[in-house]
Amino acid sequence: MKIRKNNLAIFTTPKITVYLIHDMPSGLTNKVILVTGASGGIGSAAALAFNQAGAKVAITSRRKEKLDQLARQMKDPLVVPADLSSPEQSVDTIRQVIEHFGRIDVLVNNAASIIVTTADTVTPADLLQAFSTNLIAPVVATQEAILHMRRQGGGHIINIGSPGFMMGIPFYAPYVCSKAAFSAWTRTIQAEWSGTGIRISEYFPGYVSTDSKPESRIGEVEQDFLMEKKQNFITKKFTHPKTPDDVARDLIHLILKPKLLMYSDLSVRIGTFIANFPKIRLSIASQMAKTARAKRNLMPHS
């Protein structure tokens, strides 16, 4: 079956969905795009979509075998295995892209460390791991990329943020704390580099369903362990998952028509607005905590 949505031709069968760019401006043709955290989820879906739209794509993550699997589905990608929690490897990744392609037009800072633990047992090591990957790595990569973007007359930095820090997502303290800092960094450079030809975009995807499991300190957890079918309408709407392909389509549009902030959908926009009302925010987040405690048999403050 063929349907059309947001300028994309979508072909579906019972087992596979293929997205082809249809009537899309050729703004991605030959653009050099680096996607971090490309071994799965949002990163791999975005890399494939960019490549199908004509971009020259570099992919990086720690998992080389996953990158190689992804590369076999792409046309002439640059594969750069790297641990982006290391500032040195972050810088080296940018330099390899420049050496291979001669330029870098778009940097998508997507790599993330997600640690699930209780707030009263978060360790300094947990926080260091989260901040190294979720803040320091993209800061260092952006600083290196910006040197080349300025020389070539422009570029685009896309930071994959998270509105979860505004809600206070329970049991994800290292992640949401580091993402709050990442959002602050994004908005700071938006101000400092405004009018320079360097575009800075922040993307809020909300809850995205992927096959990647978080690193858990409270036993094995599924991605939806905060979710409950009987939640109230607002909570259910805020936690309704998007897919990596949804995000990939958004990112193509964000490159073609840059914005300072892009939400994945109206529910995420509403959720960030609701987060400004403390009692409502607490009601939603505490319901998530209650659901998670019930699933994992956790006592409050345990």
Image: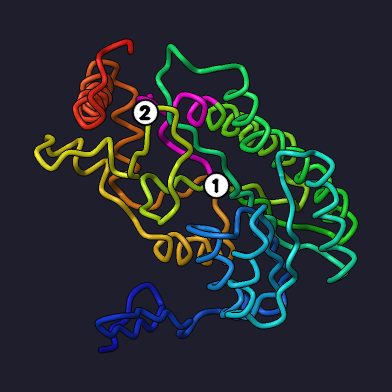
Residue at x-position 36% and y-position 53%: 209
Q: Are marks 2 and 1 in contact (CB under 8 Å)?
A: no
- Residue 103 is left or right of residue 174, and the answer is right
Quadrant containing the N terminus is: bottom left
* Three-letter residue code for mark 2: Ile
Residue that numbered label 1 is attached to: 160
Whether residue 247 is visible here, answered yes or no, is yes
| Quadrant hosting residue 77 | bottom right
- N-terminal-most mark, 2 or 1: 1
The residue beneath circle 2 is: 169
Q: Position of residue 83 (x, y in %)?
A: 72, 47
User: Badge 1 local density, few (<14 within 10 Å), some, or many (20+)?
Assistant: many
> What is the distance, in whole Å, between disc 2 and disc 1 at their CAs?
17 Å
Above or below residue 58? Residue 169 is: above
Q: Is 68 situated above or below 145?
A: below
* Magenta run includes residue 5: no
Q: In the picture provided, is 271 more to the left or to the right than 40?
A: left
Q: Dot 2: what SS?
A: loop
Instruction: Name the residue rendered at 38%, 27% in the picture.
Output: 218
Foreground: disc 2 or disc 1? 2
From the top left corner, tell me how far across and down residue 26 is, in percent.
61, 80
Amino acid type of the residue tagged 1 in the rendering: Ile
Q: Where is residue 65 in the image (x, y as percent from the top left)?
A: 63, 65
- Name the side, left or right, on which 155 lies relative to 125: right
Q: Which quarter of the rendered picture does the C terminus lie within?
A: top left
Query: Would residue 88 appear left or right of 7 to someone viewing this image?
Result: right
**Mark 2 neighbour density, 10 Å: few (under 14) some (14–19) many (20 or more):** many
| Range drawn in magenta | 159-177
At a point 75% along the width and 61% down the height, the residue shown is 80
Residue 162 is one of the magenta-drawn residues: yes
In the image, residue 22 sits, relative to residue 253, either above or below, namely below
